[in-house]
Image: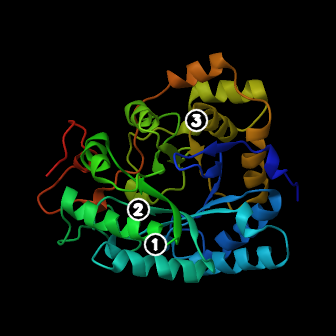
Amino acid sequence: MEQIDPRLVPKRTLNNGEQIPCIGMGTFGSDHVSPEEVSAAVAGAIRCGYRLFDCASVYGNEDQIGLVLEDAMREGVVSREDLFIVSKVWNDMHGKGDVLLSCAQTLKDLRLDYLDAYFVHWPFANYHAPGCDGDSRNPDSKPFRVEDFMATWRQMERLHDMGLVRSLGMSNMTIPKLEAVLPLCRVKPALIEMELHPSFQQPELFAYCVEHGVQPVGFCPIGSPNRPERDKTPDDVNDLEMPQLREIAKAHNVHPAVVCLKWAVQRGAIPIPFSVHEKNYVSNLRCVTEDPLTEEEMETLRGADSNCRLIKGQVFLWPGADDWRLLWDEDGVIAQ
């Protein structure tokens, strides 16, 4: 296996002084990759040179990943201090005391004493059955409410106070939601995960996060061709087929996916691509250490944004809400 020196991978400094690699590996198998395959990829990625891994309780593989992390540290392949391990609390664990229980289970599964970052996965307690279709709805789902979110965030802050979590994060947020909650946070989020790829660049939200000192982390960085079927619609753009992107890939003699990752890192995001294939995840890491895109190429890609959201989230809609766009506050106010 090709090994990339982790010291060659640039790092970002978060608003709390912690440092994080500029690229990581996601661990969501998109309902089609087994936990064993994911953990095997994590094992290979550690040896390749990855140090950032994005996990979540709902992915159903943290216990297998924990065995891999334990083995790698015991064998001296990596130290705990070298790793940046992320996890997230799922929507069904937002209740009083539940966030702490969820984090405790994650720490047990991952065989760690602390997490480098812990995220609120979605900003509401709406959840769905695993593998459900796009028309599935939970009758108990509710729209976002500031008081509910802040009750969850107070538990996140307690985890931070206890030293179990070094940085806090939010995910799947919007500017209206952030404007409502950021002034209320005692411990500010250091990171925000959002969907980011060339055909969906979210320039306003990205700029808002940067302006407020919160590091953007981009999921679906190559456009998520293997996302769940429930999130696919006929109008979706395939980033890897975008002519501007393919032309740049040809000029650099690389796969279009590599261009997506170079673009993300040079823009200032932290992409978290996932692959179980060694060739792919090695290439993903190597690409941030060599042959950057030109300013002209970055500008070409900036102009290629088509505002195509791939992860709609419609399974989280509440009774009476019939359009997934309500989740994303597209009219500038928090939908109710």
- Of residues 1 and 191, the one drawn nearer to the viewer in this rendering: 191
The residue at the point 29 percent across, 56 percent down is 314
**Quick check: can you spot residue 143?**
no
Task: Name the image quarter holding the N terminus.
Answer: bottom right
Distance, label 3 to label 2, CA atoms, is 22 Å
Q: Position of residue 90 (x, y in %)?
A: 39, 70
Viewer-proximal residue among 319 and 65:
65
At 24% from the left edge and 47% from the top edge, which residue is drawn?
180
Q: Secondary structure at mark 3?
A: loop
Q: Which mark is residue 58?
A: 1
Q: Is residue 315 above or below residue 182?
A: below
Q: Is 215 on the left or on the right of 47, as rendered?
A: left
Q: Pointer 1 and pointer 2: residues touching (CB < 8 Å)? A: yes
Q: Report which residue position mark 2 lands on.
A: 121
> How packed is label 1: few (under 14 Cα within 10 Å), some, or many (20 or more)?
some
Mark 1 or 2 closer to N-term? 1
Residue 333 visible (yes or no): yes
Residue 166, by quadrant, is bottom right
Q: Which kind of residue does numbered mark 2 sit on?
A: His
| Element on which disc 2 rests | loop
Mark 3 lies on residue: 268
Task: Left or right? Give the position of 313 relative to 2.
Answer: left
Q: Say which amino acid is labelled 1.
A: Val
At 68% across and 25% down in the image, what residue appears?
A: 248
Q: Position of residue 311 (x, y in %)?
A: 40, 51
Separation (CA) of disc 1 from disc 3:
27 Å
Q: Nearer the viewer, mark 1 or mark 3?
A: 3
